[in-house]
């Protein structure tokens, strides 16, 4: 990967350098799966993330922004992210 190969470190400096190159979870760029944080975080932390996203109306704002620039499907076509406590 670009991060593992040092490309981001060369371009952006230490801010994108993994703390432990032997630990895949210390890299800033991971699998790139929508909602993948749900698999890595405990239920409490997922709830905190979900609450922050709701508080800032993230999904509606993201949908509006992507439609404005002509990318992504309309929000009505995007399934809602499942909540851990549902």
Image: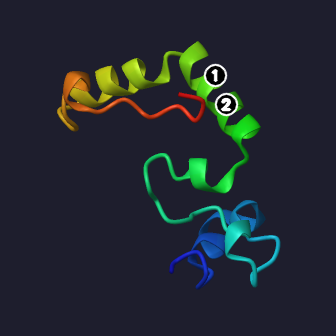
Q: Nearer the viewer, residue 14 or 4?
A: 4
74 lies left or right of 34: left
Residue drawn at x 44%, y 56% as measured from the top left: 33
Element at label 1: helix
Tell me whether circle 1 and circle 2 mark residues in contact (CB < 8 Å).
yes
| Res. 65 image quadrant | top left
- Residue 56 located left or right of residue 22: left
Q: Position of residue 4 (x, y in %)?
A: 61, 81
Colour setting = rainbow
Front residue of 11 and 22: 22
* Classed neighbour count for the residue bearing mark 1: other residues with Cα under 10 Å, few (<14), some (14–19), many (≥20): few
Q: Which residue is mark 2?
A: 47
Picture disc at residue 15: none
Expressed as whole percent of the image width and height from the top left, the position of residue 21 reads 75, 81
Mark 2 burial class by Cα count in 10 Å: few <14, some 14-19, many 20+: some
**31 up-or-down from 36: above or below:** below
Q: Nearer the viewer, residue 18 or 36?
A: 36
Q: Position of residue 62 (x, y in %)?
A: 39, 27
The structure residue drawn at horizontal position 58% and vertical position 47%, both measured from the top left corner, is 38
- Regarding residue 68, the answer to whether it shows in the image is no
Q: How many marks?
A: 2
Secondary structure under tag 2 reads helix
Compute the Cα span from label 1 to label 2. Answer: 6 Å
Q: Which residue is mark 1?
A: 51
Q: Is residue 36 visible?
A: yes
Hey, which quadrant is residue 8 in on the image?
Answer: bottom right
Residue sticking out furthest to the right:
19
Residue drawn at x 53%, y 31% as measured from the top left:
83
């Amino acid at each position: 990967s670009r991060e593992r190969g040092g490309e981001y470190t060369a371009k952006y400096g230490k801010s994108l350098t993994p703390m432990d190159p032997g630990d895949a979870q210390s890299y800033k760029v991971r699998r790139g799966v929508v909602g993948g944080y749900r698999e890595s975080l405990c239920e409490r932390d997922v709830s905190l993330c979900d609450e922050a996203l709701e508080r800032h109306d993230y999904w509606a704002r993201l949908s509006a922004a992507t439609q404005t620039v002509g990318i992504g499907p309309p929000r009505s076509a995007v399934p809602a992210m499942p909540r851990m406590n549902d």
